[in-house]
Amino acid sequence: MAIKVLFVALLCASAFVSPAIALLMGIILALIFGNPFPKFSKKGSKIALQVSVVGLGFGMNLYESLAAGKEGMLFTIVSVIGVMCIGVLLGRWLKVDKKNAYLISTGTAICGGSAIAAVGPVINADDDQMSLSLATIFILNAIALFIFPPVGEWIGLSQQQFGTWAAIAIHDTSSVVGAGAAYGEEALKVATTIKLTRALWIIPLAVASSFIFRSQGRKVSIPWFILLFIVAMVLNTFLPIPDALTGGIVVVARKLLCMTLFLIGSGLSVSSIKKVGIKPLGLGVLLWFIISVVTLLVVCLL
């Protein structure tokens, strides 16, 4: 009972701290006491993330967001295709299971756990392969949220540069938005726009995967919240909605995002870390290092 009360208390408190601290709170709770509500955390974090992202759309102007994301469009196309090809080749070199390598590459190339969850059923991945890939991506995703903002500050990246870098090099949408919010308002807008554009690649990749793994007929999960995010931006741009209302929605969305990160962090466990193993984790780290360094160099040079 005490652990359940602590979980609820920390969940509520996470709404009033930074994204990185919220994630850390969840991780510490999970590793020391365990998660008393694992099913709620898994389902709740997914729903809360989608709602918070849609809510953030009410704080963005369509024209400004398109202008901010225009520069990252080419990066998105090149990075998605490049990471998938490099990941599959590295997987063969490291002798990682074919489906595990494909799922890790998918999570790195597009949007972390959401991409893996969408593509996994299409390629007929089993529970162990899904869990292994998700754990690998999750661990690296958690690390990215902590190290990207300080590295960006140290190098002296502009808001535009950091937003582009974070959107391409960080896996999950939650951590991209969290890192962007920690770095600044403009970085948040750029990171969110580019990241959600990148997430749309789930659809064509899932369709292509069904042919690659010869599993036609399986259902493809479409990320509908991305379309709602665009609708929110359109409404905020073209309708005379009071600033007090849209501002309030954005504030609630940011607090909900921090609570989402707490739930995600609370889903980590010692067993999931052990289950990752050396080779899949090595593939994930190597792939992540490549995309992070290459993207950072391109962002700094342009």
Image (cartoon, helix red, strand yellow):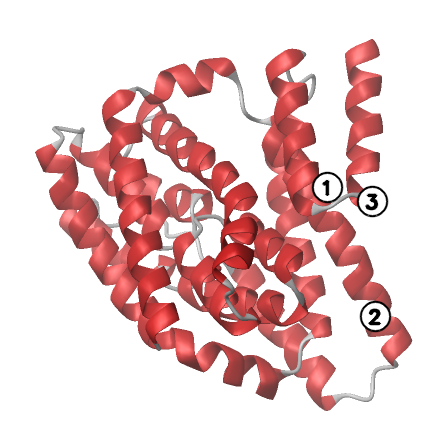
Decide if residue 222 is on the left or right side of residue 106. right
Picture quarter with the C terminus: bottom left
Q: Which residue is mark 3?
A: 16
Question: For the residues marked 2 and 3, what is the alpha-carbon distance in whole angstroms?
Answer: 17 Å
Number of the front mark, 1 or 3: 3
Above-or-below relation of 143 to 240: above
Q: Earlier in the sequence, mark 1 or mark 3?
A: 3
Q: Which residue is mark 2?
A: 247
Above-or-below relation of 117 to 34: below
Residue sitting nearer the eye, 140 or 199: 140
Residue 38, image x, y percentages: 62, 23
Residue sitting nearer the eye, 241 or 183: 183
Decide if residue 121 is on the left or right side of residue 47. left
Question: For the residues marked 1 and 2, what is the alpha-carbon distance in whole angstroms?
Answer: 19 Å
Q: Quadrant of residue 73?
A: bottom left
Q: Earlier in the sequence, mark 2 or mark 3?
A: 3
Picture residue at 83% right of the left edge, 36% below the top: 12
Picture residue at 52% right of the left edge, 82% below the top: 66
Q: Are marks 1 and 2 in contact (CB under 8 Å)?
A: no
Residue 43, image x, y percentages: 61, 36
Q: Amino acid at mark 3?
A: Phe
Q: Which residue is mark 1?
A: 259
**Number of numbered markers:** 3
